[in-house]
Image (cartoon, rainbow, N blue to C red):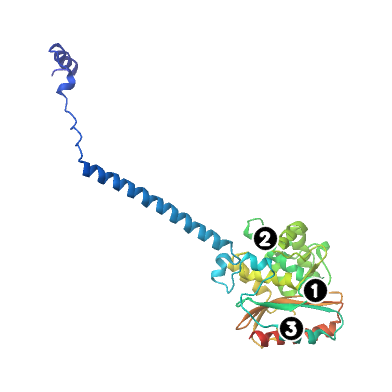
Amino acid sequence: MVKLGETVNKLARRGKEPEEFLPRKPSPKRLSARELEGLRRNKKEGRKWILGLVVATAVFSLGFWVWGQREGGWEGMISPIGESIQELSEGGLSTKKVETKEIEEKIKAQVGGLQGTYGIYIYNLTSRHSYGINQDGVFPAGSLIKLPVILTLYQEAEAGEIDLESEYVLKAEDKKTGAGVIQYKPIGTKYTYRELAQLMGRNSDNTAFNIVHQLLGDERIQVTIDDLGMTKTSLGENETSPSDIGLFFRRFYAQSLLSRNHRDEIIDYLTKTADEDRIPAGVPEGIKVAHKIGNETNSFSDAGIVFGKELFILVILSKDALEKEALEVLPEITKIVWEFEN
């Protein structure tokens, strides 16, 4: 067999380059002017199509982002409310014209002859109209301050900082007098953080509050309060306003502050509580009310969501009041509001 090198040498001696005997690549086909123009046109159309796709994708993404920034975000698609930041910053301007002067006069007549000061705030979650009296007045918060504490606990859990199923062992220094049952339990009793949240909501347990408060710290809880826009609410001073508590419930119920499951879990804690003689006593039997009472010296309050045909938030705060008068008038105010809203 002739080796490749020998063949190349023979070809060289004949004065021919080896490449002349190799297969040649076919010459490129020369395109007509019409064909060239067609290619240029197709290329141009392709660029336009790609640019259009990029622009459409950007607009679509921006639209989703803007929707997510609305109060309620994606939660607003399954909740009866989704408000703009402007509405919230202006204290919840109504999107529906509702004449409220008459009902405000009725509420004023209920509390006018009573000792102390009352502040009432109402917000309809469907129509988004709001009204009340002394809505921005500052009142003792009492146990209403537990609301942002429970919210903060669940936010930390969703951030992966706290496990709600972790157990806490009760210590002597944890116990606080007043509302709740944990104060009567033996040292060493174990509670999960989820159980402590439930006891704060359902029984307004002061010892559970003390444990979770210490776990989270004042600064973290106040950040939650400030982020919600509750400008008249202070954890350290234990004070708030009717409109601030109303804002808490609006954002808690309508905005994606928590997953829907966690939100509904907390609503369950606030339903059928140990204290049903205030707002729940003023609505027809069988109507669900998720609420939190607040007691302080000469201050008797209640606030929550009434799940009637029309869902509405009702906040009733008092200060320098008589307990007997307050406990009688809170259900009466609720009846007036219920009849107006439903």
The mark closer to the camera, 1 or 3, is 3
Which quadrant of the view contains residue 190? Answer: bottom right
Q: Residue 176's x, y, as percent?
A: 83, 68
- Which sits in the foreground, 116 or 143? 116
Residue positioned 40% across, 50% down in the render: 51
Q: Quadrant of the N terminus?
A: top left
- Which sits in the foreground, 305 or 188? 305
Q: Quadrant of the C terminus?
A: bottom right
Q: Which class describes the residues within 10 Å of circle 2: few (<14), some (14-19), or many (20+)?
A: few
- Which sits in the foreground, 46 or 180? 46
Is residue 334 at least partly visible in the picture? no
| Cα–Cα gap, marks 2 and 1 | 24 Å
Q: Which mark is residue 179?
A: 1
Which quadrant of the view contains residue 285? Answer: bottom right
| Helix, strand or loop status at disc 2 | loop
Vertically, is 189 above or below 134? above
Q: Disc 3 marks which amino acid?
A: Glu
Q: Residue 46's x, y, as percent?
A: 34, 49
Compared across the picture, whether 322 is left or right of 73 comes to: right
Q: Disc 1 marks which amino acid?
A: Ala
Name the residue that disc number 2 marks.
166
Q: Which mark is residue 75?
A: none
Compared across the picture, whether 156 is left or right of 115 comes to: left
Q: Residue 19's x, y, as percent?
A: 18, 21
| Cα–Cα gap, marks 1 and 3 | 33 Å
| Helix, strand or loop status at disc 3 | helix
Please report whichever mark, 1 or 3, sits nearer to the chain's N-terminal start.
3
Vertically, is 99 above or below 243? below
Question: Does the residue at mark 2 contact the one at mark 3 (Cβ under 8 Å)?
Answer: no
Please report whichever mark, 2 or 1, sits nearer to the chain's N-terminal start.
2
Vertically, is 238 above or below 24? below
Q: Which class describes the residues within 10 Å of circle 1: few (<14), some (14-19), or many (20+)?
A: some
